[in-house]
Image (cartoon, rainbow, N blue to C red):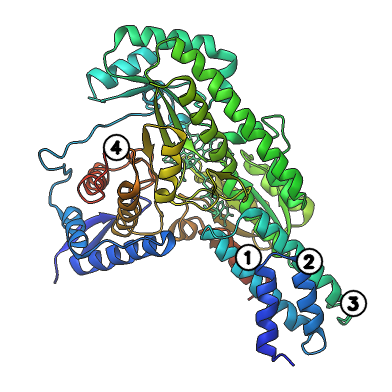
Amino acid sequence: MATEYALRMGDGKRIFLTKEKILSEIEAGTAHAADLGEISALDGNELEKLAEILMMPGKAVSVEHGMEVPVTHDIGTIRLDGDQGNSGVGIPSSRLVGCMVHERAFGADTMELGHIDYSYKPVKPVVSNECQAMEVCQQNMIIPLFYGAMPNMGLYYTPDGPFENPGDLMKAFKIQEAWDAMEHAAEHLTRDTVWIMQKLFASGADGVNFDTTAAAGDADFYGTLHAIEALRKEFPNMYIEAGMAGEMVLGMHGNLQYDGVTLAGLWPHQQAPLIAKAGANVFGPVVNTNTSKTSAWNLARSVTFIKEAVKVSTLPCHVDMGMGVGGIPMLETPPVDAVTRASKAMVEIARVDGI
Amino acid sequence: MASKEELIQELSDAIISCKKDAVLAAVEKAKGVMEPAEIIEKGLAAGMNQVGVLFERGKLFLPHVMMAADAMTAGVKILEADMPAGAQKKTMGVIVNGTVEGDVHDIGKSIVSTMLQSAGFEVHDIGRDVPIKNFVEKAKEVNANMIGLSALMTTTLPGQKGVIELLKEEGMRERVKVMVGGAPATQAWADKIGADCYAENASEAVAKAKELLLGK
Ligand code: B12
């Protein structure tokens, strides 16, 4: 009987596959990405290399010497003291402790201060608190400390915000009204994030992280790109990182453009030039994990998309790797075998600049 | 004169163009040649399915889906006048759709509601972070044929099971189908909790709902 290797399904379930089956899953995964993104599939050597990484005997694997990349941690301040509903581990600790533990014990190369609600809009009423926390952290830490949150433009729609929910308007065929609501929300998003970051920069933030950009679709992307542009103009030396919410920009509006490019329907390699144009320093591409497919299929698909993004991007690409993205299974605590294999493949095959 | 195949293609293309004028013109042209039911099924509905696929691939966007649905409704209205009484207002089914308790992710769920509605189902979208009992109460109130359950987190997924259990307790499980979805859900999970179906995305949700409720 042919040797079988322990892999995972996208939902984390253990499976055992032969090398032949692994290769066929990899081929199907890379072909899926190539078809959707209209990009090239992985070549023969890359397919072999990916299979090799997946079949390595160790439980955890690592990159080759000299291929180490910087690791940035988002929301880590909350990951320690947050509860399960917040993807945390529930250890009572302050945000300062969270940041310092990441710096001194976990070896994070950069770190981010975040708010328990982790969206920009709810930072507004507590911005003084955030500024104070930033100052205290900066006084105690050496690694670059950003401020980060999600643009999360959905918070500007009813029931959370002032504008009628475009989803409801759309269902009632009120398309013009839906467009108006999205455009107004995008304006507010730009205005609020710029205002918040002006305050946090005055308090010593080393940079800003836009986490899960475009979660509410193309208008969310539009609002964020304009915020990046405004911040770059005002703070020429500010470090700006823009990470995405998903692999493709959802077309909720459909017509919005940036720099003459329609934002809806863009894949990672098409997002990268716009993020650069707006003035960011780092791009965080994302590829979603399909929970019904194997890790071989998912990883090949993710690496194919990310490789193309790295190729065309003028900015360093720090790929988003976590529970349910980047070829990693969707679990609260993703298994170490899958996380390390996916990370190695991203560095050695997709050639990402960071994670 | 255009052949039947050409007319079907024209109907489908008109829907994909998302233009009401084009759809109405294609329907007028096909009317004398084909049966209304055939125009709807093979032409308009086939085009609508294609719209769903193009949406998933990022080639058409939500407003286009709505415009195509609007155009299709207008096309069907013209045809209804020629249809035998009784065949006219065929309700496709009533669906209650929502995101389970503890979970505020509603973007995908709303897209699913929109697509189901565009396909002709009566959809009651009850929002996000919805307590288990509200699904069952709403299903009773609107006499639903199906409940759609969205969950985007591994931690909230068990809520889907909770609704199925409550439906059983209330003696309603036999008459209400359950469809589950959201990124962490899989066919294996659907089987495990005894859901009637799982769909990976919105266009698949429409296809599966049709299969379950209309038998096609
Ligand atoms: C947008 C987003 C948010 C937004 C949600 C805004 C909103 N109004 O929906 C906000 C910012 C609020 C948010 C919050 C949180 N999020 Co979130 N979020 C996402 C994100 C980036 C995208 C989800 C999305 O909208 N996708 C686009 C839509 C179109 O796709 P979809 O939802 O999968 O829907 C499709 C299918 O699944 C299917 N489908 C969906 N529903 C249904 C229903 C039926 C019946 C059927 C048949 C089909 C079906 O059809 C849809 C269309 O094709 C994902 C990561 C990702 N890329 O997937 C994380 C993600 C889901 N979030 C996650 C987490 C952890 C959270 C938070 C806990 C974060 C925090 N620490 O605070 C909170 C949760 C709060 C809560 N209690 O719910 C994790 C979940 C991980 C896990 N192990 O479960 C993810 C995977 C990100 C990650 N890797 O960390 N999030």
Packing grade of label 4 (10 A; few <14, some 14-19, many >=20) is: some
Q: Amino acid at mark 3?
A: Ala
**Residue B207, image x and y in percent?**
60, 68
> In the rendered view, would you say A310 is above or below A158?
below
Q: Quadrant of residue A112?
A: top left
Residue A35 image offset from top left, x and y in percent: 41, 65
Q: CA distance from mark 2 to mark 1?
A: 19 Å
- Residue hosting label 4: A355
Label 1 sits on residue = B209
Which is nearer the N-term, disc 1 or disc 3? 3
| Mark 1–mark 3 distance (CA, rounded to whole Å) | 27 Å
Secondary element at image label 2: helix
Give the secondary structure at mark 1.
Answer: helix
Which residue is the site of mark 3? B81
Q: Nearer the viewer, mark 4 or mark 1?
A: 4
Residue at horizontal 31 percent and vertical 30 percent from the top: A72
Badge 2 crowding class, 10 Å Cα cut-off, few under 14, some 14 to 19, many 20 or more, is some
Q: Is mark 3 within 8 Å of ligand 1?
A: no
Task: Please rate how many residues cluster around mark 1, counting C-alpha atoms within 10 Å: few if below 14, some from 14 to 19, many from 20.
Answer: many
Identify the secondary structure beneath mark 3: loop
Query: Which residue: 44% across, 14% down?
Result: A201
Pointer 2 residue: B73
